[in-house]
Image (cartoon, grey):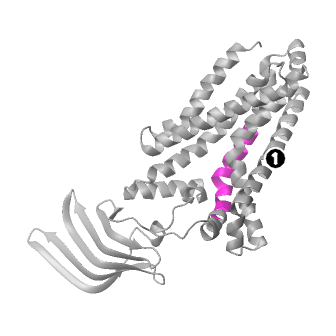
């Protein structure tokens, strides 16, 4: 790597790490101040709090990576511009691409690390973070949905009138089995109870109807047990669940939710697309940051950094709005997640064509 590339790349990566550390310090102080009352109320030990922030910090780092990389880019480029280093580089016969190149290398390093962390490492840490928050921060969870429907296989559907997640008991349960849209079997039970030892469901006070060519067969009994493609975890608190799944686990979970015909599948699909889109967001914002801050400004570095914050704020607004549209079903999830990247890619290309090279 050329001396110029090494010089800029080193400055960029060091500044990125510095910005991340500052951001983390601010976020942790604010978060601790907000949650301290609940820590005291629940008598949480210092060790547990430290373990919580051990998993909380990587989560925040991954969350703010696109913005912190953008801010670091703007800061480094603005410093180079105000010290007329960019003018000197261009005057020596180098093109503007030679200035962008080390930032591009740095953004690829950050983007690759971000994808690996988000997809395979941070989800394991998030399991501890989410468990801690559910135990000490969040209110007790009660499954309150009524008249719940599940697709338990390609031809069978389950209905529960209500479910008690504390006792793991479902009430007034119906399972219907179809063959080419024709009802073949119907099972009704007053209760289904989860047996932790056998990991099977017990049906209480059940009645089964089997429809065939000769007519209808009816069976009933007090109790029998069986396995179903559902478990008590399907009625647990779904808070932060997508953040605890690795890429392979997320793909398997999405497949299972599609099989069941769940309305919540789109939320996990959106999470999957975000993990793929975020590395490209880093690269796009870094290149945009170089273009924004490469001109020397009379207002100084502070003005360029403020301008960079403005663009970062606009990107966040675009991202939040696009995600909301995707969750509401107004836009296809893949389009909504990639829309901010597409818009800012166009903006980056337009601004690149305007600057002297």
**Looking at the magenta stretch, what is its main secondary structure?**
helix
Q: Give the side of residue 211 with respect to residue 74, left or right.
A: left
Residue for point 71% across, 75% down: 43
Q: Is residue 61 above or below residue 91?
A: below
Q: Is residue 225 above or below residue 122?
A: below
Q: Give the side of residue 154 with respect to residue 142, left or right.
A: left
The front one of 209 and 173 is: 173
Element under label 1? helix
- Magenta stretch: give its range: 108-127
Q: Where is residue 216 in the image (x, y as percent from the top left)?
A: 12, 73
Residue 236 falls within the magenta-colored stretch: no
Q: Position of residue 7 (x, y in %)?
A: 90, 31
The quarter of the displayed image where residue 137 is located: bottom right
The front one of 248 and 167 is: 167
Residue for point 66% across, 40% down: 279
Q: Which residue lies furthest to the bottom in this view?
A: 222
Q: Quadrant of the N terminus?
A: top right
Q: In this view, does 134 lie above or below 89?
A: below
The quarter of the displayed image where residue 328 is located: top left
**Residue indicated by mark 1:** 22
Q: Quadrant of the C terminus?
A: top right
Q: Where is residue 347 in the image (x, y as percent from the top left)?
A: 63, 23
Mark 1 surroundings within 10 Å by alpha-carbon count, few (fewer than 14), some (14 through 19), many (20 or more): few
Residue for point 66% across, 35% down: 313
């Amino acid at each position: 790597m050329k001396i110029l590339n090494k010089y800029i790349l080193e400055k960029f990566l060091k500044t990125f790490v510095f910005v991340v550390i500052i951001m983390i310090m601010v976020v942790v102080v604010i978060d601790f101040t907000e949650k301290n009352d609940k820590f005291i109320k629940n008598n949480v030990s210092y060790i547990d709090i430290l373990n919580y922030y051990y998993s909380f910090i990587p989560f925040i780092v991954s969350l703010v990576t696109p913005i912190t990389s953008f801010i670091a880019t703007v800061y480094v480029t603005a410093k180079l511009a105000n010290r007329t280093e960019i003018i000197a580089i261009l005057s020596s016969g180098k093109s503007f691409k030679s200035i962008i190149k080390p930032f591009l290398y740095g953004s690829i390093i950050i983007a690759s690390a971000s994808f690996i962390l988000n997809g395979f490492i941070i989800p394991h840490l998030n399991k501890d973070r989410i468990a801690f928050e559910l135990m000490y921060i969040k209110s007790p969870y009660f499954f309150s949905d009524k008249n719940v429907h599940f697709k338990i296989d390609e031809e069978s559907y389950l209905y529960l009138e209500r479910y008690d997640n504390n006792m793991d008991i479902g009430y007034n349960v119906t399972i219907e089995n179809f063959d080419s849209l024709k009802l073949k079997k119907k099972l009704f039970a007053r209760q289904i109870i989860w047996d932790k030892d056998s990991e099977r469901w017990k049906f209480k006070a059940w009645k089964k109807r089997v429809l065939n060519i000769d007519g209808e067969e009816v069976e009933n009994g007090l109790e029998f047990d069986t396995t179903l493609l559902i478990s008590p975890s399907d009625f647990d608190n779904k808070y932060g669940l997508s953040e605890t799944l690795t890429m392979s686990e997320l793909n398997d979970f999405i497949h299972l939710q599609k099989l069941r015909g769940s309305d919540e599948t789109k939320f996990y699909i959106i999470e999957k697309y975000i993990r793929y889109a975020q590395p490209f967001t880093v690269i796009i914002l870094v290149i945009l940051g170089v273009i924004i801050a490469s001109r020397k400004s009379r207002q100084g570095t502070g003005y360029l950094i403020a301008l960079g914050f403005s663009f970062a704020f606009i990107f966040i607004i675009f991202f939040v709005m696009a995600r909301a549209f995707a969750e509401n079903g107004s836009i296809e999830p893949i389009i909504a997640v990639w829309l901010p990247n597409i818009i800012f890619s166009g903006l980056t290309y337009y601004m690149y064509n305007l600057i002297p090279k």
